[in-house]
Image (cartoon, rainbow, N blue to C red):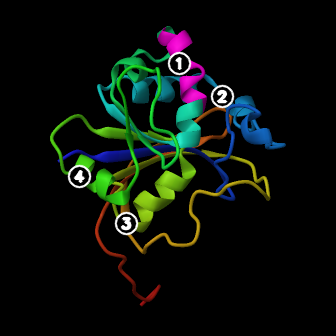
Amino acid sequence: MRKIIVSSFITLDGVIQAPGGPEEGFKYGGWSAPYYDEVVDQVSEKNKKPAADYLLGRKTFEIFASFFPEHPEMWPSINHGTKYVMSRTMKKSDWENTVFIDSLEDIKKLKNSEGLDLQVGGSGQLVQLLLKHDLADEIRFLIHPLTLGEGNRLLADGTIPAAFTLVESLSTPSGVIIANYKRAGEVKTGTMGG
């Protein structure tokens, strides 16, 4: 069975929309750029290295497909890995190794198949679907020290109660907190101090 690993640039108020640039016409597009330091770069490069396949939403796929095929040196494995794209409207692409899927059942079949782990980047609606159906095995947050007050948020209504264990964390000189979590069963409750 494959693991599904979600990686997300996120603000303190949960916004994930357009961290790298002005895509989607979002007025705060590119909000992560001022915090992109050597440590963030090292972590990003490390996360690109393992052989993986990719599970992407249509919007993220379109952004990636408009850039990475022409800049293979920036992320070689994304060009060679299989890209599974969740879309009900898009059915073909010229980008090599692209497969379109269109349902939750397709994702479940993919997760239960043999193969490389599935990395999910961006793809807010897809991540919400994965969290709602308990399909994310790991979450890697790059938490940026700012709030935006608007924009697409990652942890929206419909996320199920779930516990996670912190497996790695560090902070960067620019104040980004990198926190990697693995799924850890059900939520446990209790009383503080008692």
Query: Mark 3 belongs to which amino acid?
Result: His
* Main SS category, magenta section: helix
**Residue contact at pointers 4 and 1, CB within 8 angstroms:** no
Determine whether the residue tagged by mark 2 lies in a helix, strand or loop.
Answer: loop
To which residue does mark 2 refer?
36
To which residue does mark 4 refer?
109
Q: CA distance from mark 1 to mark 2?
A: 19 Å
**Residue contact at pointers 3 and 1, CB within 8 angstroms:** no
Which residue occupies the foreground of this view, 106 or 88? Answer: 88
The mark that comes first in sequence, 4 or 1, is 1
The mark that comes first in sequence, 1 or 2, is 2
Q: Which residue is depicted at the point 25% across and 47% down?
A: 110
The mark that comes first in sequence, 3 or 1, is 1
Query: Mark 1 belongs to which amino acid?
Result: Phe
Q: CA distance from mark 3 to mark 1?
A: 30 Å
The mark that comes first in sequence, 4 or 3, is 4
**Residue contact at pointers 2 and 3, CB within 8 angstroms:** no
Q: CA distance from mark 2 to mark 3?
A: 32 Å
Which stretch appears magenta? 63-72
To which residue does mark 1 refer?
68
Looking at the image, the residue that sits furthest to the right is 27
Query: Mark 4 belongs to which amino acid?
Result: Lys
